[in-house]
Every structure is written in C-alpha cells, then in structure tokens.
Image (cartoon, coloured by chain):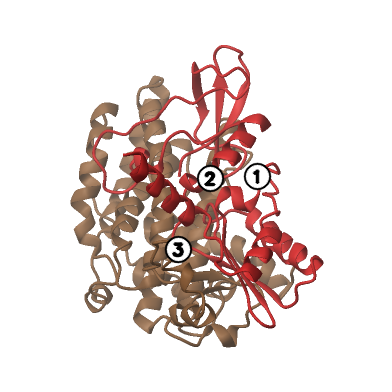
C-alpha cells in the first residue's frame, strides 16, 4: 500500500500548496512564498498553506491568500508583504485577494514548517483536523498529547484554550515546568 | 473593517480562465465558490456578477452578521477585566473570530444595496439592526457572559454545520470557515460552565442565576420567520436546530448538575428591528468614533 500512501500524500501536498503549472507563474510563486507570518516569523506563507495561487498574465500578477482564522489580523501584513516582495522583484500590477474557500486547516502546514515551529519553541499541531472531529462527528473527541518543544516531554497540560494569537493555545510542561505555545489543530 | 470582501464565482472563473490547474491538476474542485477580500477593488466592481446577494439573502446575511458583530463588541469589553489574564486573551480571541465572521457576512449583505461592511456596522440606527436579543444581553458578571457564550456558541455551531450545505456558495464558504472556530468557542464555554457549576458555592450560585437570566432569550434563537420560507435551501431553518442544540447541551448541564429554569419567554423581535433596551447603548459606544470622524482611517 506504499504507492497508495504516496499518492494520497501527493494529493494532500497539491491541495496544501497548489503551485502553478506554468514556469512563469511558478517563478512568481517562489518569490511570494518567501513572505513570512509576522507573528511567527519562522513560517512562510507557503509552509502554512496560506498561499493559494499565483498567476502571472501578460500585464499583471494575481495572488490569492487564505486566512488562517476568519479574524486573523496578520493577514493584512501578509498581504502587504506579498505586494511588496513581488513589486520589489520587478513585477507590475500585483493584486492580492483573500479567499475563504476551501477553508484553511492546520493539515496544510508543511513538515518543514512543523520542524521550524518546534525549533522556534512552539509545539506543532498534533494530528489531523478530522481527528478533532469538527462538524457532525461522533461523540468521542480525541486530544492527542502535546509534546513540549523544549524537553520533548509528553507530560504537558493545557493552561488556556486561547493563546497569544488566534491560532495558538497556552500549555505548560510538567517536567521542565516551562510554559509554551501550541499551534492548535483547526 | 475597512476592507472589501468579494465573492464572485464568475469573476473567479474569468480571472483564472487559463488556470485549469487550480481545479483539475490538484484534484480539488472549489465547489464553494470563491470568496475574496480585496482592498484594492472598488465597490462598483464588487456589485457585478452573481456574488451580489439578492435582497432576501442580504437580509439573512445581515441577521447572522449582526449577531456576530454585537456579540463581538460585548466580549471586547472584557479585555483587561476578566477574572484572569488567560480569560482576557480567550474572550478577546473569541471576539476576533466573531468579528471575522461579521465582516464576511456584512460585506455580503452590503452587496445588495451597494453598502460596505463599515456602512452597515457604523451607519445604521437601532431599528435597522437585526440581532437576536440574546447577544444584546449585558455582559453581567462573568457567569452571565459564560452562559450567553454557552448558548450562542452551541447554536452557532449547529447553524454553521448546516449552512455549509447552503445552495448559496458565499454563505457556504463563510460557514465552512466559521464552524471550525465556533467549535473552539463551544469547548471554551463548556469548560467554564463546568468549572463555575462545580467551583465554590458562590460560583455555583452565580452560574445558576446567569443561566436562568439568559434562558428566556433562547426561544427567539430558534424561531422561524417568513424570510426563512423564501430562502429554502439557502438559509437554515432555525427551528430545525433546536433538537440538536438541546442534545448538545444536555450532557453538559447534566454533568454540571444544572437545570433549566423554564419560566417566561422573552418576546424577541430582533429580526424585525425590535430590540432589547441594551442595544442602543451598545451601538452608541460602538459607532461614536466613526460618526465623530466620518471617513477617518489610520
């Protein structure tokens, strides 16, 4: 079943990072993909799965981003940064739109992104969004253990459901006793 | 709330006419349509195409948008005043999510009358608002706010779960995003209901009082209205949510050993512009800056 897994993981990656098929647009994608989340500056918008499309036409560049959370204030900065980095790279008539559909999920975060998050001191989302069971799911809701990014202990507990930004909650490690942010599954 | 949200399935198709890879190569079909926020797009461009809400859909979007907007404004007042710092952060985050939903919904509502989300939020007077009375109820003590959150978050979760299947692509897209966020709001309020109910005698007394104060406003939430008849397949019929709502809260109330005080039922009327005595004061505070300095930005 390895081939099936690989196929499904390729499909997943194509949904998380829908890179344009043509080389010209792909080059602009690579430029836009350098923009980082202003609140978590180790993650690029490509790592997050926030960069949804880049299309270069004869006289313009159209970019779409999707917000992580409906009210995420970082989106304004990301949009401005995309405009700036593409304009700085010589592209003209750059426009950036925000799209809501399909709804963003932490499942789209790249493995590289998750590793960078941990190194930065933020625990990466554990498990897929379907595990959390948003929507009309069964009565059993799972919460996988969250690993301390500092000492890797699984002996941690949630201090607060909501943290320093919309996308995080606040945890504490019961072994090293340090508090840490957890990028919660959405 | 200065940006514009553009939901336009046709212009999406046009602007990506040669970008078949977007839908085909990646095995993903964007069946919810395309909802976009674009600061650079002018209003005149937004009102073209099928993403313009009909008068009825706009009215429905206004209902839902006003609920989120008013509740968000209320929750914002807790920042720096909650019982603990984590709650300042939590209620602020919940409010932020709700503002996000309100922006999307009010923008869409405004497409029917060429008004922006700001026009709708800041320049309507009380009778033109469509919020439910429950979101207008004052913050009270922390238990009142939690009781209100508990009721509204559970209602919104059931609502958005079903609205994802709306025949209206824009409403469906907004709901698909919102449902995941209100799921966290539901968890948050549930945890607090349990903590307050099983905390001290004082916290339990307050939780009981809060639930009985808020419960009279639950009935209006699930009341149908002629508009809903006209929006079959687009809107979610409120009365159909009641059994799922009751089933979701029952185990929490049982674990908290709380009983619903079934007494009087408030008259309601928010959907037709008849509001509780609290809304006008809230609007005065929310709108004063914009009205004192029309068009100001920073």
| Mark 1 → mark 3, Cα distance in angstroms | 22 Å
Q: Is residue B238 above or below residue A34?
A: below
Residue B133 location (% of width, % of height): 38, 59
Q: Which residue is mark 2?
A: A109
- The residue identified by callout 1 is A43
Where disc 2 sits, the SS reads: loop
Percent of width and height locating residue B71: 47, 54
Q: Is residue A59 shown above or below B19?
A: below
Please rate how many residues cluster around mark 1, counting C-alpha atoms within 10 Å: few if below 14, some from 14 to 19, many from 20: many
- Chain A colour in the picture: red
Does residue B126 appear anywhere in the picture? no
Answer with left or right where residue A35 lies relative to residue A51.
Answer: right
Q: Which mark is residue A101?
A: 3
Residue at the spot x=24%, y=36% of the render?
A139
Is mark 1 in CB contact (under 8 Å) with mark 3?
Answer: no
Pick the front one: B292 or B244: B244
């Amino acid at each position: 079943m390895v081939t099936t897994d690989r196929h499904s993981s390729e499909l997943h990656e194509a949904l998380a990072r829908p890179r344009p098929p043509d080389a010209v647009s792909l080059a602009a994608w690579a430029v836009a993909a350098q923009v980082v989340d202003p609140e978590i500056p180790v993650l690029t918008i490509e790592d997050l799965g926030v960069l949804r499309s880049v299309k270069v036409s004869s006289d313009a560049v159209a970019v779409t981003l999707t917000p992580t959370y409906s009210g995420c204030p970082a989106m304004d900065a990301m949009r401005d940064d995309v405009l700036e980095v593409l304009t700085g790279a010589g592209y003209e008539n750059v426009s950036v739109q925000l799209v809501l559909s399909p709804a963003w999920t932490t499942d789209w975060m790249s493995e590289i992104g998750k590793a960078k998050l941990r190194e930065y001191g933020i625990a990466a989302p554990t498990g897929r969004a379907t595990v959390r069971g948003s929507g009309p799911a069964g009565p059993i809701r799972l919460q996988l253990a969250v690993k301390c990014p500092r000492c890797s202990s699984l002996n941690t507990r949630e201090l607060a459901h909501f943290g320093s930004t919309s996308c995080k909650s606040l945890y504490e490690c019961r072994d090293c006793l340090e508090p840490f942010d957890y990028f919660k599954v959405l | 709330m200065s940006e514009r949200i553009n939901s336009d399935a046709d212009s999406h198709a046009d602007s990506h006419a040669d970008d078949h890879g977007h839908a085909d190569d990646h095995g993903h079909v964007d069946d919810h349509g395309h909802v976009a926020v674009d600061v650079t797009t002018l209003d005149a461009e937004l009102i073209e195409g099928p993403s313009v809400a009909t008068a009825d859909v706009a009215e429905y979007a206004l209902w839902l948008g006003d609920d989120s907007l008013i509740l968000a404004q209320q929750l914002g007042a807790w920042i720096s005043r909650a019982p603990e710092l984590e709650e300042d952060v939590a209620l602020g985050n919940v409010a932020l999510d709700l503002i996000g939903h309100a922006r999307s919904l009010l923008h869409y509502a405004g497409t029917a009358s060429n008004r922006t989300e700001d026009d709708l939020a800041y320049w309507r007077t009380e009778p033109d608002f469509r919020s439910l009375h429950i979101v207008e109820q004052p913050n009270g003590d922390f238990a009142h706010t939690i009781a209100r959150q508990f009721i509204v978050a559970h209602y919104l979760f059931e609502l958005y779960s079903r609205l994802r299947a709306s025949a209206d692509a824009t409403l469906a897209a907004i709901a698909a995003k919102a449902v995941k966020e209100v799921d966290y709001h539901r968890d948050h309020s549930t945890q607090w209901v349990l903590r307050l109910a099983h905390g001290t005698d004082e916290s339990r007394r307050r939780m009981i009082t809060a639930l009985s104060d808020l419960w009279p406003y639950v009935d209006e939430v699930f009341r149908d209205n002629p508009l809903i008849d006209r929006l079959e397949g687009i809107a979610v019929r409120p009365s159909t949510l009641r059994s799922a709502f009751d089933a979701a809260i029952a185990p929490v109330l049982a674990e908290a050993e709380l009983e619903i005080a079934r007494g009087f039922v408030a008259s309601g009327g928010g959907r037709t512009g008849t509001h509780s005595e609290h809304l006008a004061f809230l609007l005065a505070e929310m709108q004063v800056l914009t009205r004192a300095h029309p068009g100001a930005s920073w």
